[in-house]
């Protein structure tokens, strides 16, 4: 058996798979987020340990005796969080999470230093780890003076599991301290934030051994002491391992609350100007790029709330056949946009409304607007040298075949729909645990799920979609000019 532990923002998931990668069972425990001030988002790392204990206890109770067969553990987690420890490994303050924006001024100042984009291949976003440490230095100097180690969330779990300060490349790439091309800490970037490499964990690849399970915990859970713990991955890279998106040219589109177009790369291809994330992948010698849109299914949920119709009801009104764009356009910038604009101030809009505009037309425009936002990410990836031939769809929004037809036509790419199963971050983490424990070939372990269906672009509407996309592209600068 192999155990995957995924530390998310809303909970911890423990997933058990067997040697054939069949999911045996899972356990889950919830987490809360503290928001003591506007723009702040924090969690107490002690709650992560509690939730991990609860998730494993649930798994143990539902599958008695089977944890004794675990031969490897993999870790996945929410990225970018700043977990600050003193010289005795005691937590100095609540962890500042990925969606905390208090350090926006510090991020802008670091981003103005050309070394950061040059070495990391990314814009310094407020959610990244480095600007948070500068904020702590500026606002909590007594705490900053005591910082002996900075750990990412999943690596704090590793410290508890193994007693080791270790991280891996995919998660560390989101700190703004990693030389992403060279896959190592940058002393220049650390110095720029008044830190040094002694305060960082050591680095391994996600497939490598990175600590071993402490005997105390092994005894409590009925497991063997010394089980290897894999380096693991940040949540998106772990999900990609679960989806089998690990080789150059493979990609998935995640249609969740936010949207992600994720592409695996065999080389380092940064494009920070387009707000594309370029990170190390969890497998050695591989990288990945992500275009991120902030309101994907959230846009449909917004329309659902104001129309009084459920999201499924709204999409059902469209029928099965893809329709030509109506001339009504929707910009899905309800909370700003990441790729390609990096604009937190921009807001969404409908344009082209008329007396005859119906609820169905609005729904169609929302689905098309999100599809065009993914097209923006595809264009940004292309500028960085990444060419895609097909994508796999995941996330709750992928249940709408109409939406998938719109995305396929907007991207000009076939969209594969995987067969039912659990291919998320916890599954990817378990796969990494298997690789670390057995030395198996990562490409043989991290395979793609079976395809249930393929949605092809609707060729008859390709020109109409191309025209609608050009209208969509022209709207951003126009709307930006009147957005406060």
Image: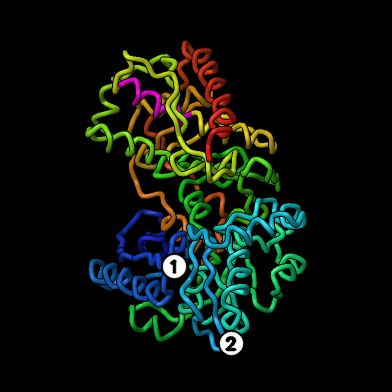
Disc number placed over residue 162 in the picture, else none: none
Residue at image mark 2:
87
Residue 382 seen in this snapshot:
yes
Residue 393 percent location from the top left of the image: 43, 37
Residue 169 position by quadrant? bottom right
Classify 10 Å Cα crowding around label 2: few (below 14), some (14-19), many (20 and above).
few
Q: Residue at x 41, y 79 (%)?
A: 224
Residues in magenta, as a range = 360-371
Q: Do the residues labelled 2 and 1 touch (CB within 8 Å)?
A: no
Residue 161 percent location from the top left of the image: 46, 77
Residue at image mark 1:
42
**Residue 198 to residue 445: above or below:** below
Q: Does the magenta stretch include residue 368?
A: yes
The numbered mark, 2 or 1, whose residue comes first in the sequence reads 1
**Residue 381 to residue 50: above or below:** above
Mark 2 lies on a secondary structure that is: loop
């Amino acid at each position: 058996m192999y155990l995957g532990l995924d530390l998310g923002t809303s909970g911890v998931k423990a997933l058990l798979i067997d040697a054939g990668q069949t999911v045996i069972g899972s356990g889950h425990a919830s987490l809360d987020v503290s928001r003591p001030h506007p723009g702040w988002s924090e969690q107490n790392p002690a709650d992560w340990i509690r939730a991990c204990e609860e998730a494993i206890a649930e798994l143990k109770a539902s599958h008695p005796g089977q944890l004794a067969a675990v031969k490897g553990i993999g870790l996945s987690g929410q990225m970018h969080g700043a977990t600050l420890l003193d010289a005795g490994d005691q937590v100095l303050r609540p962890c500042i999470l990925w969606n905390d924006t208090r350090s926006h001024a510090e991020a802008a100042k670091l981003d103005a230093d050309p070394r950061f984009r040059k070495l990391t291949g990314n814009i310094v976003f407020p959610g990244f780890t480095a600007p948070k440490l500068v904020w702590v230095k500026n606002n909590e100097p007594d705490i900053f003076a005591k910082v002996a180690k900075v750990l990412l969330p999943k690596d704090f779990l590793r410290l508890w599991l193994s007693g080791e300060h270790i991280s891996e490349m995919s998660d560390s790439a989101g700190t703004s301290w990693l030389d992403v091309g060279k896959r190592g800490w940058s002393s220049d970037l650390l110095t720029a934030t008044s830190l040094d490499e002694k305060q960082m964990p050591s680095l391994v690849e996600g497939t490598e051994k990175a600590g071993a399970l402490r005997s105390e915990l092994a005894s409590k859970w009925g497991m063997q002491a010394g089980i290897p713990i894999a380096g693991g991955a940040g949540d998106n890279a772990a999900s990609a391992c679960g989806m089998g998106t690990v080789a150059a040219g493979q990609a998935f589109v995640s249609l969740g609350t936010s949207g992600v177009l994720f592409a695996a790369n065999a080389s380092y291809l940064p494009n920070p100007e387009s707000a594309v994330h370029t990170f190390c992948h969890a497998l050695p010698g591989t990288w990945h790029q992500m275009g991120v849109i902030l309101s994907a299914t959230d846009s449909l949920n917004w329309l659902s709330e104001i129309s009084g119709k459920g999201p499924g009801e709204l999409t059902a009104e469209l029928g099965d056949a893809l329709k030509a764009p109506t001339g009504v356009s929707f910009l899905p910038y309800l909370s700003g946009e990441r790729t390609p604009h990096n604009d937190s101030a921009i807001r969404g809009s409908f344009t082209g409304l008329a007396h005859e505009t119906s609820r169905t037309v609005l729904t169609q425009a929302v689905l098309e607007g999100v599809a065009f936002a993914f097209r923006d990410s595809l264009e940004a990836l292309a500028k960085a040298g990444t060419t895609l031939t097909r994508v796999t769809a995941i996330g709750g929004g992928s249940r709408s075949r109409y939406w998938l037809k719109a995305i396929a036509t907007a991207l000009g790419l076939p969209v594969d729909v995987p067969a039912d199963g659990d291919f998320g971050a916890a599954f990817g983490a378990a796969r990494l645990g298997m690789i670390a424990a057995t030395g198996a070939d990562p490409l043989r372990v991290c395979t793609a799920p079976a395809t249930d269906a393929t949605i092809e672009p609707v060729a008859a509407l390709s020109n109409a979609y191309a025209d609608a996309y050009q209208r969509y592209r022209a709207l951003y600068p126009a709307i930006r000019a009147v957005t406060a």
